[in-house]
Structures are given as structure tokens and as C-alpha cells.
């Protein structure tokens, strides 16, 4: 088993890894847009789109750290605080995967109306690549 950790304080507080690889499966924990230098503050607290872009990039990095690639992503789960932000989060999903040449197709679920550990969080994403 391989795992990857970030400075995110919730990983050490609650005892989990950002990503874990077991055989050909990789699991990416729910990822948010916390700042890398100050993980108790959020990047782009007013923009679900920009939070989602950062989250997808961070998720891909965590996949690469355990030997996967963006093209290995099979499933994405998106949790969105306000339904009014769902189009912006979907636009970031498309920009990250479907707008690639050739297009990367993923299975996706979006759940709206959730609460997060920080009020400024608008979106959280988990991903499951298969290598």
C-alpha cells in the first residue's frame, strides 16, 4: 500500500491520507481548496468555480504521488454547499477532464446542500482512479 499526505491539518487530526493506492485502485479523500501555506484558510472563498479548479488539480497531484495519472480517474464525487454553485463546479469538472484532447470521460455524482468543516468551503471533491 502506498499513501500520500499533505499539510492539511484535518489529515493528521483525524488520521487519514490524502490518497491511498491498493493494488490497481487509488482512492482520493475529500479534497477542498485550503491554502498550502496556511491550511486553516481557504483559497477563493467567494468562488465555487475557482475552488473546484484548485481541488481537481490537487486531487490529480495526489493521484500522481501514488503512481496514477489524470487519465486513470474513473469516478468523481462532488459535494456542493449551495445548489446555485452546481453549474460552476460542473464547469470546472469539464475543464479538468472533458476539455482534454482526447477527452477524458469520468463517472460523476454531485450532491448539493451539504455543510463543511469551514463555512467558506463551497465544494469538496473525492476521486477514484483505476490504473
Image (cartoon, helix red, strand yellow):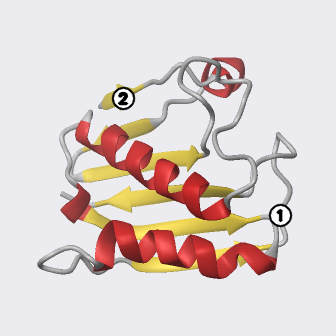
In the foreground, 74 or 95: 95
Identify the image quadrant of the N terminus: top left
Q: Is residue 103 above or below residue 120?
A: below
Q: Is residue 95 above or below residue 105?
A: above
Q: Is residue 40 above or below residue 106?
A: above
Q: Secondary structure at mark 1?
A: loop
Is the residue marked by circle 2 packed among few (<14), some (14-19), or many (20+) residues within 10 Å? some
Q: Is residue 19 above or below residue 11?
A: below
The mark tally for this picture is: 2
Q: Which label lies toward us, 2 or 1?
A: 1
Q: Secondary structure at mark 2?
A: strand
Mark 2–mark 1 distance (CA, rounded to whole Å): 27 Å
- Most distant residue in the left direction: 102
- Residue annotated with mark 1: 114
Residue at 69% from the left image edge and 36% from the top image edge: 42
Residue at 51% from the left image edge and 50% from the top image edge: 55
In the foreground, 34 or 125: 34
Q: Is residue 115 left or right of residue 37?
A: right
Q: Is residue 64 left or right of residue 6?
A: left
Residue at 60% from the left image edge and 43% from the top image edge: 33
Label 2 with label 1: CB-CB less than 8 Å:
no
Q: Is residue 73 left or right of residue 12?
A: left
- Residue annotated with mark 2: 3
Is the residue marked by circle 1 packed among few (<14), some (14-19), or many (20+) residues within 10 Å? few
In the foreground, 88 or 65: 88
Q: x, y (%) of residue 52?
A: 55, 58
Q: x, y (%) of residue 115?
A: 86, 56
Amino acid at each position: 500500500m502506498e499513501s500520500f499526505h499533505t499539510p492539511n491539518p484535518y489529515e493528521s487530526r483525524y488520521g487519514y491520507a490524502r490518497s491511498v493506492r491498493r493494488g490497481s485502485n487509488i482512492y482520493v479523500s475529500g479534497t477542498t481548496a485550503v491554502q498550502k501555506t496556511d491550511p486553516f484558510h481557504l483559497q477563493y472563498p467567494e468562488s465555487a468555480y475557482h475552488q473546484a479548479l484548485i481541488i481537481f488539480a490537487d486531487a490529480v497531484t495526489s493521484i500522481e504521488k501514488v503512481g496514477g495519472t489524470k487519465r486513470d480517474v474513473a469516478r468523481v464525487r462532488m459535494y456542493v454547499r449551495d445548489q446555485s454553485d452546481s453549474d460552476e463546479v460542473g464547469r470546472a469538472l469539464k475543464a479538468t477532464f472533458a476539455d482534454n484532447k482526447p477527452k477524458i470521460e469520468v463517472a460523476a455524482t454531485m450532491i448539493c446542500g451539504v455543510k463543511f468543516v469551514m463555512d467558506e468551503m463551497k465544494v469538496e471533491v473525492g476521486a477514484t482512479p483505476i490504473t
